[in-house]
Image (cartoon, rainbow, N blue to C red):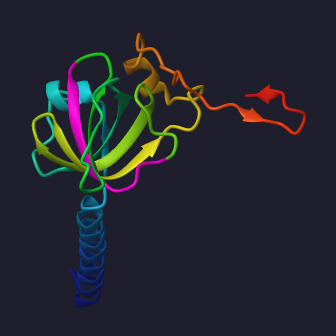
């Protein structure tokens, strides 16, 4: 090979190495901001043969088990259980819960797995509409019934008739 061809090959090799390195660094940086979605059964039994690791950041979705919500009277700490079709997972959260949060309601929580079956959540989102559900979650949630609250307030209109 002549020197000019060797020089071009070296430049192409260096450019290729830099591109591969840049892609590798981007993927490594994005790895910390990825929140994988799990259901309570997948946390306990594993997803695709792998269980999440303690300390892993994740999202969990399921129904709040009726009677499982416990609130600390001294702070904003709340603890509740989530269920899909199998085992339950306990979620602890410190903060103000969404207005739509209630027992029997579907929620999605973002947090860190602190123990097998226990999650410390930083964010809790209540589902707005029980009609729409992602296909993967709908498949997992078959057989679980959405529970509506018994004492829904009715609002009086100006003519005195109650409406929902």
Quadrant where the image shows the N terminus: bottom left
Residue 49 higher or lower than 23, as above or below = above
Quick one: 13 or 159, which is closer to the camera? 159
Q: In the rendering, at what x and y percent does residue 50 appear?
A: 14, 33
Residue found at the very far right of the displayed protein? 159
Where residue 68 sits, quadrant-wise, is top left
Q: Relative to 132, is 9 on the left or the right?
A: left
Taking the spot 35% from the left edge, 44% from the top edge, the residue there is 109
Residue 88 shown in magenta: yes
Q: In the rendering, at what x and y percent does residue 130 appear?
A: 56, 27
Q: In the rendering, at what x and y percent does residue 95 appear?
A: 34, 56
Q: Relative to 56, is 138 on the left or the right?
A: right
Q: In the rendering, at what x and y percent does residue 71 appear?
A: 28, 43
Quick one: 25 or 69, which is closer to the camera? 69
Q: Which residues are magenta?
A: 87-98
Residue 24 higher or lower than 90, as above or below = below
């Amino acid at each position: 090979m002549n020197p000019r061809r060797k020089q071009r090959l070296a430049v192409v090799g260096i450019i290729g190495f830099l591109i591969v390195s840049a892609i590798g660094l981007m993927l490594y940086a994005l790895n910390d901001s990825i929140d994988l979605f799990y259901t309570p059964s997948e946390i306990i039994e594993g997803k695709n043969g792998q269980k999440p690791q303690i300390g892993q950041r994740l999202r969990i979705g399921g129904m709040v088990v009726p009677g499982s919500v416990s609130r600390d009277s001294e702070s904003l700490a709340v603890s509740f259980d989530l269920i899909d079709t199998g085992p339950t997972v306990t979620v602890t959260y410190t903060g103000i819960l969404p207005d739509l949060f209630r027992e029997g309601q579907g929620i999605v929580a973002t947090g860190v797995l602190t123990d097998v079956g226990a999650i410390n959540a930083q964010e809790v989102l209540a589902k707005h509409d029980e009609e729409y559900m992602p296909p993967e979650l709908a498949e997992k949630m078959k057989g679980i019934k959405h529970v509506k609250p018994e004492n829904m307030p009715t609002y009086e209109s100006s003519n005195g008739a109650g409406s929902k």
